Amino acid sequence: MEPLDQGKLPTHLAIIMDGNGRWAQQRMLKRIVGHQRGAETVKMVVEQSSQLGIKYLTLFAFSSENWSRPAIEVRALMTLLKKYIRHETARMMRNNIRYNVIGNRSELPDDVNQTLDEAIQETAANTGMVLTLALSYGGRQEISMAAARLARDITAGVLKHEDVTVDTFSGYLDTGGLPDPDFLIRTSGEMRISNFLLWQLAYTELYFTDINWPDFTINELHKALADFQSRERRFGKTSDQIISTKAYASR
Ligand code: IPE
Ligand code: IPE
Ligand code: MG
């Protein structure tokens, strides 16, 4: 396994877990079997990330656009989600992980919302990694809803329009309080963002792998993190500036 520098892990890792359907279809299995196998990968990645000391893990589990899939697949995904949360809460407690959800929860079935509320409440006092599930989530939807809330606050006189900055706007998003992702992994070979965290990914390092999500292993996770560690994040500065800041910091 690739050796990792503990001091250079992403604070916030985000993942677009893709390729469950193709994984199943390549094996003449039903798509839902791919989702079930994908849930096993989720368990591994959650536990590994928390043990590595990653502070925030955000998983794209169901998009606003995924509602357009066949009803039978949507229903199966909702059932799987509920089962996953129920079964995994004990492990979340053992690993001191706190649940968080982003996305349009009003579109989720009531029983799913109830299970989510229970898991959020039960893990609320945990102080380790924050596991954010993006459910019925779309970046554009999130941004437009944030804009609507902000407009409402301006009308109500709670906020002045001249106080609208990048930071105040960020606070209106579902991710308010979370740092922006440092690293984004997308599996299955697709090179697109698919409406995930559009605002928050502004300076995120991107990583794409051809591996389908059910085949994503600990080794693949370490390989991706090692790749992240080899990158120089410049945030618009020159490489020389980055090197001299580092030299100064290590004096
Ligand atoms: C990702 O796998 C899981 C969800 C989007 C819910 P897909 O179901 O998108 O798998 P492919 O892309 O069809 O292979
Ligand atoms: C993105 O995957 C959403 C999730 C992983 C939940 P999709 O499989 O829905 O993405 P597109 O539609 O192929 O871009
Ligand atoms: Mg897909």
Image: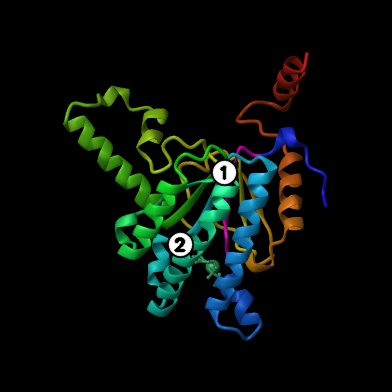
Q: What residue would you read off at disc 1?
A: 96
Residue 83 lies, with reference to residue 235, above or below; the image says below
Q: Quadrant of ligand 1?
A: bottom right
Q: Residue furthest bottom?
A: 28
Q: What range is drawn magenta here?
A: 10-18
Amino acid type, label 2: Phe
Q: Crowding near pointer 2: few (<14 within 10 Å), some, many (20+)?
A: many
Magenta span contains residue 245: no
Question: Horizontally, is 228 left or right of 163 in the view?
Answer: right
Amino acid type, label 1: Asn
Residue 193 seen in the current view: no
- Which mark sits nearer the N-terminus, 1 or 2? 2
Q: Which mark is residue 62?
A: 2
The CA distance from mark 1 to mark 2 is: 24 Å
- In-front residue for pair 207/91: 91
Question: Horizontally, is 36 left or right of 146 in the view?
Answer: right
